[in-house]
Image (cartoon, rainbow, N blue to C red):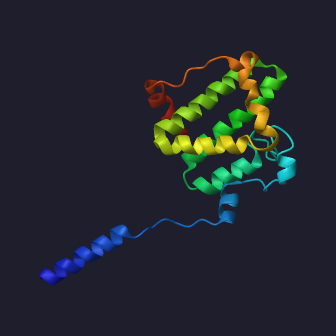
Amino acid sequence: MFKLTCYLLLAIVAISNYSFAEEYTEQYIIDKLKLPEEPDEEENNSTPTGVDKNENYIRDNVERKIAFEHYPDLQKIKLLNDYAAEYTKQIIHFSDGNEVVYLKSRRSQIEALGCMAFLYKEEGVLQLATIKRLLNEGANRGANAHKRTGFGSKKMNLLTYTEMKEICPNYK
């Protein structure tokens, strides 16, 4: 009886340690999330907003990187994509001189940042930093300069803990 109990315990431990994580192929993720093709690097880096074939305000290379690194966590993918899209919108609306839409976009980006920190802690903030570096590649290196001049330099508060508790669950 003792041996049987030991074998059962070993079997339970072995099963509990077994990884049931599913492997996803790149093509599966492309099809599932309807990702655009990988853009030509030179063309992609020739403008501040990069190539965006599916017109969702997210550079195609950034959208693909987010998907491949974070699938199947759709909540994290949405937050990172929202952050990237709002970044692009800020560049566009600063150039257009549209202060109201620019500041609304900044607020949305702050919400994505706050929710990444709230839901994913330090890991989420580090992942946002990686996306921001990618957004600043090529011609985008100086694109963030808009935040240092004119209405782009207006200060905006980060989310409070109460706001995060209210806003962040909506990203599910």
**Residue 142: percent from left, percent from top:** 78, 33
Report the residue at 34% width, 67% height from top.
16
**Residue 36: percent from left, percent from top:** 77, 53
Is 172 on the left or on the right of 108, as rendered?
A: left
Tell me the quarter of the picture where residue 82 sits: top right
Report the residue at 80% width, 29% height from top.
92
Is 32 on the left or on the right of 4, as rendered?
A: right
Q: Looking at the image, which is closer to me, 143 or 159?
A: 143
Report the residue at 43% width, 68% height from top.
19
Report the residue at 52% width, 66% height from top.
22
Q: Looking at the image, which is closer to me, 5 or 130?
A: 130
Please say whether residue 172 is visible from this viewpoint.
no
Is 140 on the left or on the right of 167, as rendered?
A: right
Please say whether residue 98 is visible from this viewpoint.
yes
Against 7, is 165 above or below? above
Specify the quadrant that holds the N terminus: bottom left
Tell me the quarter of the picture where residue 88 sits: top right
Q: Residue furthest left?
A: 1
Against 43, is 97 above or below? above
Q: Looking at the image, which is closer to me, 62 or 148?
A: 148
Is 86 on the left or on the right of 24, as rendered?
A: right
Against 99, is 1 above or below? below
